Amino acid sequence: MKRPNSYWNHQIESQEGSIERMMKDELMRKKANEKNQKNITRTFEERMDFYITSSIAIMSFILVGFVLKYMI
């Protein structure tokens, strides 16, 4: 025979398990959000590096063009 409170003990244990699962899910969600944020930041930094480099190259070509135009 089961003890009369074993049902309630089982309910409490299952609730504790669900709380642990919820905490694990929340932790995994936070980690995934941090990882996505890092990826977005890294992509943005790579794009900005490309834009800065290309703008410097274009400005230097324009400067060389003006120098050649007025020197020759």
Image (cartoon, rainbow, N blue to C red):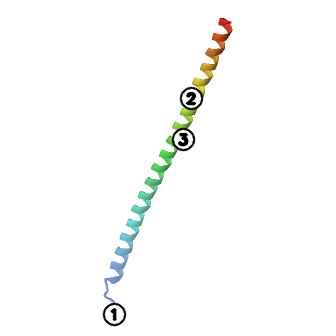
Which of label 3 and label 1 is nearer to you? 3
User: What residue sits right under mark 1 in the picture?
Assistant: 1
Query: Tag 2's secondary structure?
Result: helix
Image quadrant in which the N terminus is located: bottom left
Residue occupying the point 34% across, 74% down: 12
> How far across and how far down the image is residue 6, in percent?
33, 83
> How far across and how far down the image is residue 32, in percent?
47, 54
Residue occupying the point 36% across, 70% down: 16
> How far across and how far down the image is residue 20, in percent?
38, 66
Q: Which of marks 3 and 1 is nearer the N terminus?
A: 1
User: What residue sits right under mark 2 in the picture?
Assistant: 53
Which of label 3 and label 2 is nearer to you? 2
Q: What residue type is labelled 2?
A: Thr
Q: Which amino acid does label 3 sit on?
A: Thr
Does 53 appear above or below 35?
Answer: above
Q: Which of marks 3 and 2 is nearer the N terminus?
A: 3
In the rendering, which numbered label is found on residue 43?
Answer: 3
Binning the other alpha carbons within 10 Å of mark 2 as few (below 14), some (14 to 19) or many (20 upward) gives few
Rounded to the nearest whole Å, what is the CA distance between mark 3 and mark 1? 63 Å
Image quadrant in which the C terminus is located: top right
Q: Which of marks 2 and 1 is nearer the N terminus?
A: 1
| Image quarter of residue 27 | bottom left
Does 36 appear above or below 20?
Answer: above
Residue occupying the point 41% across, 68% down: 18
C-beta proximity under 8 Å, tags 3 and 1: no
